[in-house]
Amino acid sequence: MDEYISWMEKNPKWLKLILCIGPLDWSWAIWRILKGIKANSALQVVLGILWIFLGGTVLWLLDIICIIINDYPFWFK
């Protein structure tokens, strides 16, 4: 779990952006779920699960914008 979180966060910006595009955004949804489990936050886990279904439709744009601005996808820090 920690390896996946760390891998996603340490990727270069260009790879993070590619992983945000449309259906590939599920990889960030898994990252969100694992971050929620690690933080012991039921709300973050539920939002991560919702991101699986909504991320591929419109929310991937939010991820792209956030990565361009601050090199981190949309999420709680």
Image: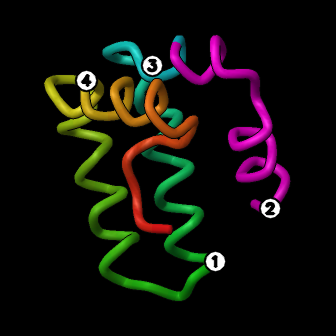
Q: Residue placed at 53% from the left, 11% from the top?
A: 18
Q: How many marks?
A: 4
Residue 2 - label: 2
Of the residues shown, which amino acid type is indicated by label 1?
Lys
Q: Which mark is residue 24?
A: 3
Residue in the foreground of this view, choosing between 71 and 10: 71
Chain-order first, disc 1 or disc 3: 3
> Which disc number belongs to residue 27?
none
- Distance of mark 4 from mark 2, alpha carbons? 26 Å
Instruction: Name the spot of residue 54 as percent of width and height, x first.
Output: 18, 38
Q: Position of residue 4 (x, y in %)?
A: 75, 47
Inter-mark Cα distance, 3 to 2:
20 Å
Disc 1 is placed on an element classified as: helix
Colour scheme shown: rainbow
Residue, disc 4: 61
Q: Earlier in the sequence, mark 4 or mark 2?
A: 2
Q: Position of residue 23 (x, y in %)?
A: 35, 17
Horizontal relation, residue 62 to residue 67: left or right: left
Residue at 15 percent across and 26 percent down: it is 58
- Is disc 1 surrounded by few (<14), some (14 to 19) or many (20+) residues within 10 Å? some
First along the sequence among labels 1 and 2: 2
In three-dimensional space, the C-alpha distance between marks 1 and 4, rounded to whole angstroms, equals 25 Å
The residue carrying pointer 3 sits among few (fewer than 14), some (14 to 19) or many (20 or more) residues within 10 Å by Cα, namely: some
Q: Which residues are magenta?
A: 1-17
Q: Amino acid at mark 3?
A: Leu
Choose top left, top right, bottom left or bottom right for residue 24: top left
User: Which numbered disc, 1 or 4, marks the residue closer to the eye?
Assistant: 4
Depth check, front residue: 47 or 15: 15
